[in-house]
Image (cartoon, helix red, strand yellow):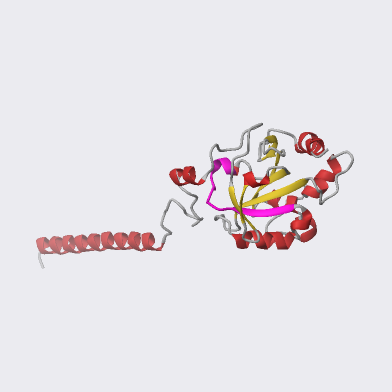
Amino acid sequence: MNHDKIQRLLGSVIKNLFLLLVALIFMSLYITDMAAPKKTDNPLNLPAAPSKDQLAANLPKPWPPKMNETYPDLALVDSNGRNFNMSDMVGQVLLVEYIDITSPISQAQSGAANAGAYEGQEVDKVAYDFKTMLYKNTTPPMEWPHDNVVLLQILVFNANGAQTSVDDAAGWSEHFGFGDDDSVIVAVPQKDIRGTELNNMIGGYQLVDKNLNLRVDSSGPAPKHNLRMTLAPMVTKLTR
């Protein structure tokens, strides 16, 4: 075999090895891509909140609630499946509390320290339940249930982050021992109202007077008013 033939043979071998290497690289990349989780706009597969247009159609006008103005006429369903509106609550002082079942504060304020966490969620170790909060911060100390105050809990997010149902309200009410005797109404919105503005009202309370005017807003991660120094004393004033 002469020198030229040897060079051609080596060149052919090298070319074939190169093509084989390229093929192996592409195959490896393909297998890796198929095995990797696909990127999506919802990587945790969380239930989608309503779109901006859907949310606008679902919310009462005006929204969100504004200080010293009539509370938006939310359409609700209580834990027994009865439909009602906020406007049906005229004549009663209301503590309005928006609930996220996964919120440690929502759990604590409802009484998880005594009843245990609902559906195994975390519980805030500092926040008082609403009965203790009122008792410790009113003069004379307010006992619960109270004839002139209703706690209206509006469950918005269930344990999966989805819109709540009447079953969620019934389960929550039963777990924490709420009933009509306790001046507590556990309800869910008739329409999906999950959104950024609502997120800012989770935790704490809003105090609504007998004319359905929002008088104190101690809700959300950045409350406008202090819960103990402003809201609790105002409850006493409005119920005299």
Q: Which residues are magenta?
A: 184-198
Q: Residue furthest right?
A: 140
Quadrant of the image occupied by residue 4: bottom left
Write the residue at 68% across / 54% down: 186
Residue 240 in picture, x, y percent from top left: 83, 38
Of residues 191 and 204, which is closer to you in this image?
191
Is residue 196 magenta-colored? Answer: yes
Please report the residue visible at 57 percent of the width from the left and 58 percent of the height from the top.
160
**Position of residue 146 measured from the top left corner of the image (x, y, whole percent):** 81, 48
- Location of residue 13 in the rendering, given as x and y in whole percent from the top left corner: 20, 64
* Residue 231, above or below 167: above
The quadrant where residue 203 appears: top right
Q: As displayed, is residue 177 above or below residue 195? A: below
Question: Does 131 sit above or below residue 168?
Answer: above
Judge by depth and name the residue closer to the eye, 52 or 57: 57
- Residue 101 lies within the magenta run: no
Residue 169 position, x and y percent, is 64, 58
87, 23: nearer the viewer: 87
**Which quarter of the image is occupied by the N terminus?**
bottom left
Residue closest to the eye, 9 or 102: 102
